[in-house]
């Protein structure tokens, strides 16, 4: 399990996160949603170890992140940022191969080659393998980096101690058309169904409701509520968190909720005073 407990983050006199508790179990996909500035990306960086909280703790498989070697952490969790930057004229295959760096000396070249090829196939970029990265479109670059993080946490000869792996995805559907958005989210789902965990930041509540096992709603740097999609995506919640008047329906095939904004209704101001966290399934790490 990857878990954060009682997280407080303050920067430049501003509270970014206050008393946040969140976790993801192996086999689970957790979506973080909320209005702009709610603290979603900050929380993802805390979970990754890139930001150390002022108070609170993060554990990976019940071990404090701060007690683990950086390479060990990197073998068990990978982060896809909102806007991955890479200025070198590497081929697509070489960019994906960067994900295997934490496994150097532990995984064989043949295992690495197999993993790199599988990651490119999984994300549908095999035909781009010899293209130079700077020549790609924004959507193609996003898919290349998704392949890179998949390669980073894949099993090699080392087996990475046989424990669950975790993907932290910050708006992975950026720059993608609707078909590739669906493919990116389904790639994360397949990863979680293999006994791993996924935390994904999404702007679209419908995407979160359609794919996540659990949704965490952040408002004003605190957790407003969390739970399964059918309990979280309600007309009241959309009004409270996003200031949106919408109707919530059920997908006839999946039973999952989806929202349809009320046409012509004026936006409301969301309540930035997040309530104390409700219905958290996270035990103390």
Image: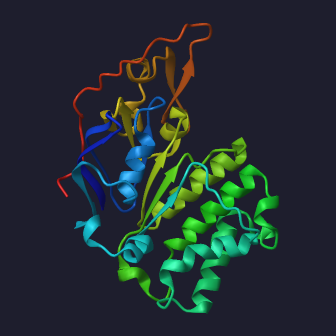
Q: Is residue 254 visible?
A: no
User: Relative to the observer, which residue lies in front, 282 or 37?
Assistant: 37
Check the picture and name the quadrant holding the N terminus: bottom left
The answer to which image quadrant residue 97 occupies is bottom right
Task: Specify the quadrant of the image occupied by residue 40.
Answer: top left
Single out the residue that lies furthest toward the left: 284
- Against 70, residue 25 (above or below) is above
Location of the C terminus (image quadrant): bottom left
- At 44% from the left and 22% from the top, the residue drawn is 238
Q: How many marks?
A: 0
Q: Taking 13 as reference, is 94 left or right?
A: right
The residue under the point 82% across, 59% down is 135
Camera-side residue of 159 and 273:
273
- Measuring from the top left, give residue 87's x and y in whole percent: 70, 62
Question: Residue 162: where, in percent of width, then height?
Answer: 37, 79
Measured as percent of width and height from the top left, residue 72 is found at 38, 76
Q: Is residue 219 visible?
A: yes
Colour logic = rainbow
Q: Viewer-proximal residue, 226 or 75?
A: 75
Residue located 31% across and 34% down the image: 13
Residue 169: x percent and y percent?
51, 53
- For the view shown, which residue lies furthest in the front direction? 12
Relative to 204, residue 198 above or below: below
283 relative to 228, above or below = below
Q: Is residue 255 left or right of residue 262?
A: left
């Amino acid at each position: 399990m990857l878990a954060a407990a009682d997280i407080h983050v303050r920067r430049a006199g501003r509270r970014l996160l206050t008393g946040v508790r969140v976790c993801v179990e192996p086999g689970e996909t957790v979506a973080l949603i909320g209005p702009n500035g709610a603290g979603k990306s900050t929380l993802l960086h805390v979970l990754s170890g890139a930001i150390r909280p002022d108070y609170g703790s993060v554990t990976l498989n019940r071990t404090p992140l701060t007690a683990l070697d950086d390479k060990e952490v990197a073998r068990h969790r990978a982060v896809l940022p909102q806007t991955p930057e890479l200025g070198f004229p590497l081929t697509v295959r070489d960019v994906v191969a960067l994900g295997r760096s934490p496994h150097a000396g532990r995984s064989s070249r043949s295992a690495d080659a197999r993993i790199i090829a599988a990651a490119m196939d999984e994300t549908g970029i095999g035909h781009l393998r010899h293209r130079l990265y700077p020549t790609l479109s924004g959507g193609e670059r996003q898919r290349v980096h998704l392949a890179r993080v998949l390669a980073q946490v894949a099993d090699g000869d080392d087996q990475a101690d046989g424990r669950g792996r975790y993907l932290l995805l910050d708006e992975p559907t950026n720059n993608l058309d609707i078909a590739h958005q669906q493919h990116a989210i389904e790639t994360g789902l397949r990863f979680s169904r293999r006994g791993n965990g996924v935390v994904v930041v999404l702007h679209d509540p419908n995407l979160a409701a359609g794919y996540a096992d659990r949704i965490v709603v952040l408002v004003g740097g605190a957790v407003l509520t969390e739970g399964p999609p059918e309990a979280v995506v309600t007309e009241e919640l959309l009004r409270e968190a996003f200031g949106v008047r919408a109707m919530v329906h059920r997908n006839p095939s999946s039973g999952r909720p989806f929202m349809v904004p009320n046409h012509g209704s004026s936006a409301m101001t969301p309540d930035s005073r997040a309530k104390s966290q409700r219905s958290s399934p996270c035990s103390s790490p």
